Image (cartoon, helix red, strand yellow):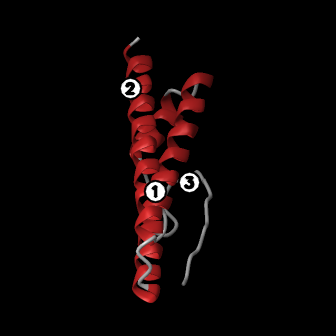
Amino acid sequence: MKAEPVRSLYYSEEILDNTRDLNINLFNLLITHYSFDSMLRTTNSLMKQILACSVVLEKYFVFLQLFKNTGNPLVSDMVASDVECLFGNIRILFDEIQYIIRELAS
């Protein structure tokens, strides 16, 4: 089993590694033009939720490999638990995007 838990944030004029870096233009816009405290906190939280969603999706492949290797049907319980977590994270993402829209519209 191989996993590489890496999380980092950097600001630059260009993407350093297209194969591993996630560039979200919304963050560039918000940080460049709307960098007041509440927006920065929300943007930071939004980044954490996107990371949390990607972790759940990546864990799916780890669980799939575990099931293929062991055949243990209890792996499905771990997948179900993580899918619930994913839906919770998506809900938080939705709420934070709505907050950003409300802040930008005011």
From the image, tell me which residue sits under label 1.
82
Q: In front: mark 2 or mark 1?
A: 1
Residue type, numbered disc 2: Gln
Q: Nearer the viewer, residue 57 or 73?
A: 73
Pick out the residue farthest to the bottom.
69
Q: Amino acid at mark 1?
A: Asp
Give the residue at x 47% y 59%: 56
- Residue receiving disc 2: 98
Q: Nearer the viewer, residue 60 or 31?
A: 60
Query: Image quadrant for the N terminus?
Result: bottom right
In the picture as drawn, the residue positioned furthest to the top comes out as: 106
Secondary element at image label 2: helix
Dot 3: element? loop
First along the sequence among labels 2 and 1: 1
**Label 2 crowd bin: few (<14), some (14–19), many (20+), radius 10 Å:** few
The quadrant where residue 74 appears: bottom left
Q: Give whichever of 78, 15 is nearer the camera.
A: 78
Q: How busy is the neighbourhood of tag 3: few (under 14 within 10 Å), some, or many (20 plus)?
A: few
Q: Are marks 3 and 2 in contact (CB under 8 Å)?
A: no
Estimate the x, y position of residue 5 in percent, counting from the top left. Answer: 60, 68
Tell me the amino acid under the disc marked 3. Ser
Residue at the spot of label 3: 12
Q: Earlier in the sequence, mark 3 or mark 2?
A: 3
Q: Nearer the viewer, mark 3 or mark 2?
A: 2
Where 35 falls versus 25 (above or below)?
above
